[in-house]
């Protein structure tokens, strides 16, 4: 599934298989450096799979004068859409005017900046809505009579992580999920990195000329217990939770609502039959792996949505919830929602010693720019190579994304015509997940039975095998809650059957190796 470096020496070792680590790995491998990436769990299993699934500038960050961050994020929206049109697409957001909160002129000014700050080319501009007559007003309480509609983008966040890792591997990187970094120390002019493979229960040591700590909410833990290095600043852990309920309205627009406590949250059509509501912001202590949406958070989100909607949302409607912990740079903000979402990179490279780069904060929208900035800092400490020039990741499509941003429906029609034996909704789901690599998944199948066992919904043995062999999936959770959201449509028994089948596939794959 990935390349192996000659011997055990690499130019760059990366701890952390979230979006930042995988983004750095992709960029570095494409430029010609020998790259190793490890994560103690599945790729994207931490913060990167628990986002609000948005590629956005961050409208609310304008209030905190985060103009550089917003401008960079706005510019990245269309760049990322261009390299991954299968997993990223435009959304329209409706912002109702609330007389008791921000005045309409301030909202309009902020949205004008939002339209013009980032060099928007394809996305539609903001417009004012009469919510008495516009379909967007139908689900809302009658007192909301005026609103604004603006553009941002959706992303399948877990798939964005995996596709960056997949492309890194195809450029020569070694990708090692479920491999914990036990220790890393400077020795003989390089990093000696000790690894523990959770699958085989074996240890090994690799060498690297530079090391990146991109462990997300575990960045401080890795710095202290693994690398034994002092971080230059504190990490602020902020928990964000989301709930999923049955679909609340018929149209495809999203809503961004303002609460009296200063927070904002979203309502987003989700997986066809559902609505996603989120997110919360609260300080977090403990192990980020244990983060769960609390009853208080679930009630808060339901009551917040009910304040705007004609039909109330109640906790008993929640069919799924998820929670993640953001590893923010501690800038001293008093409220969690005010803490900066900008990334901070710290380079520790005393003369004559291998470099260590620590990554703080960041948001999924700016991961690619974070990777470029990281490599710009690390380049003087890495060998000269002949590969792609800086900036290549914004031009070359991610795996499966090699079609035009405005041609998804044409691509869907052509794909459905090639695979007439697959139901139309399944073709659409697979094309949204895998893009043009749907051909690799289906392989030589000429009828639906050739795809093997159907585990429920439209999850087939062929798809499971592809995910095991090409995307490092090892458990049912990897598949039904990260690389897809089919867990919303599968029973506990069906998910158990997926787990059993995957264990057998993994055993077969290990024997083959």
Image (tube, grey):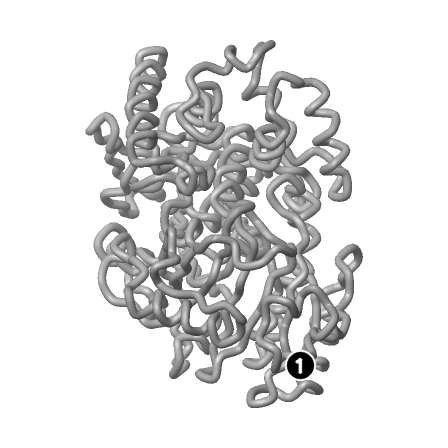
- Work out whether residue 473 or residue 390 is closer to the camera in this orientation and state it: 473
Expressed as whole percent of the image width and height from the top left, the position of residue 457 reads 46, 31
- Seen from this angle, which residue lies furthest right? 121
Going by the image, does 200 lie left or right of 155?
A: left
Expressed as whole percent of the image width and height from the top left, the position of residue 285 reads 25, 67
Tell me: residue 159, above or below residue 504. Answer: below
In the picture, the quarter occupied by the C terminus is top left
Q: Is residue 229 visible?
A: yes
Tell me: residue 112, above or below residue 81. Answer: below
- Residue at position x 57%, y 75% in the image: 141
Going by the image, does 450 lie left or right of 280?
A: right
Residue indicated by mark 1: 107
Q: Is residue 192 visible?
A: no
- Residue at position x 56%, y 18% in the image: 442
Going by the image, does 489 lie left or right of 91?
A: left
Q: Which SS class for mark 1?
A: helix
Expressed as whole percent of the image width and height from the top left, the position of residue 364 reads 52, 55
- Work out whether residue 138 or residue 33 is closer to the camera in this orientation and state it: 138
Query: Looking at the image, how many numbered discs can be counted on the residues?
Result: 1
In which image quadrant can residue 284 be found? Answer: bottom left
Tell me: residue 343, above or below residue 207. Answer: below
In which image quadrant can residue 59 be found? Answer: bottom right
- Residue at position x 53%, y 77% in the image: 258
Q: Which class describes the residues within 10 Å of circle 1: few (<14), some (14-19), or many (20+)? A: some
In the picture, the quarter occupied by the N terminus is top left
Expressed as whole percent of the image width and height from the top left, the position of residue 286 reads 22, 62
């Amino acid at each position: 599934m990935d390349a192996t470096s000659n011997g055990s020496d690499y130019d760059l070792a990366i701890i952390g298989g979230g979006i930042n680590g995988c983004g750095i790995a992709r960029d570095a491998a494409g430029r010609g450096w020998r790259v190793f990436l490890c994560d103690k769990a599945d790729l994207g299993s931490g913060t990167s799979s628990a986002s609000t699934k948005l590629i956005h500038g961050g409208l609310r960050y304008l209030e905190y004068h985060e103009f550089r961050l917003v401008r960079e994020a706005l510019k990245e929206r269309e760049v990322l859409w261009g390299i991954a049109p299968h997993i990223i697409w435009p959304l329209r957001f409706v912002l109702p005017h609330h007389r008791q909160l921000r005045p309409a002129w301030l909202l309009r000014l902020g949205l004008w900046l939002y339209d013009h700050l980032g060099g928007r080319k394809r996305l539609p501009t903001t417009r004012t809505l009469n919510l008495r007559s516009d379909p967007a007003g139908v689900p809302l309480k009658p007192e909301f009579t005026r609103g604004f509609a603006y553009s941002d983008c959706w992303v399948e966040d877990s798939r964005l992580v995996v596709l960056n890792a997949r492309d890194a591997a195809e450029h020569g990187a070694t990708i090692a999920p479920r491999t914990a970094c036990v220790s890393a120390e400077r020795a003989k002019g390089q990093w000696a990195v000790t690894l523990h493979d959770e699958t085989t229960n074996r240890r090994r040591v690799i060498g690297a000329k530079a090391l990146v700590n991109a462990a997300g909410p575990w960045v401080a833990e890795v710095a202290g217990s693994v690398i034994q290095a002092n971080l230059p600043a504190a990490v602020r852990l902020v928990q964000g939770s989301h709930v999923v309920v049955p679909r609340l309205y018929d149209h495809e627009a999203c809503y961004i609502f303002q609460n009296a406590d200063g927070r904002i949250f979203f309502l987003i059509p989700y997986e066809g039959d559902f609505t996603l509501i989120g997110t919360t912001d609260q300080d977090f202590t403990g192990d980020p792996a244990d983060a769960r949406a609390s009853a208080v958070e679930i009630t808060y989100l339901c009551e917040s949505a009910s304040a705007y909607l004609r039909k109330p949302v109640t906790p008993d409607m929640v069919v799924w919830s998820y929670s993640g912990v953001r590893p923010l740079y501690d800038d001293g903000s008093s409220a969690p929602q005010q803490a900066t979402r900008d990334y901070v990179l710290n380079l520790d490279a005393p003369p004559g010693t291998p470099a260590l780069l620590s990554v703080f904060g960041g948001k999924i929208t700016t991961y690619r720019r974070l990777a470029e900035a990281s490599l710009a800092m690390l380049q003087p400490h890495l060998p000269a190579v002949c590969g792609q020039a800086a900036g290549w990741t914004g031009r070359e499509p991610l795996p499966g994304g090699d079609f035009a941003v405005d041609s998804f429906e044409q691509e869907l029609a052509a794909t459905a015509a090639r695979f007439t034996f697959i139901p139309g909704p399944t073709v659409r789901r697979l094309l949204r997940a895998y893009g043009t690599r749907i051909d690799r998944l289906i392989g030589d199948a000429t009828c639906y039975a050739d795809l093997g066992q159907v585990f429920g919904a439209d999850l087939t043995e062929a798809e499971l095998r592809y995910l095991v062999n090409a995307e490092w999936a090892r458990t049912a959770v990897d598949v039904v809650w990260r690389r897809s959201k089919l867990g919303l449509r599968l029973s506990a028994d069906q998910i158990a059957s997926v787990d059993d089948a995957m264990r057998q596939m993994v055993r077969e794959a290990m024997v083959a190796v």
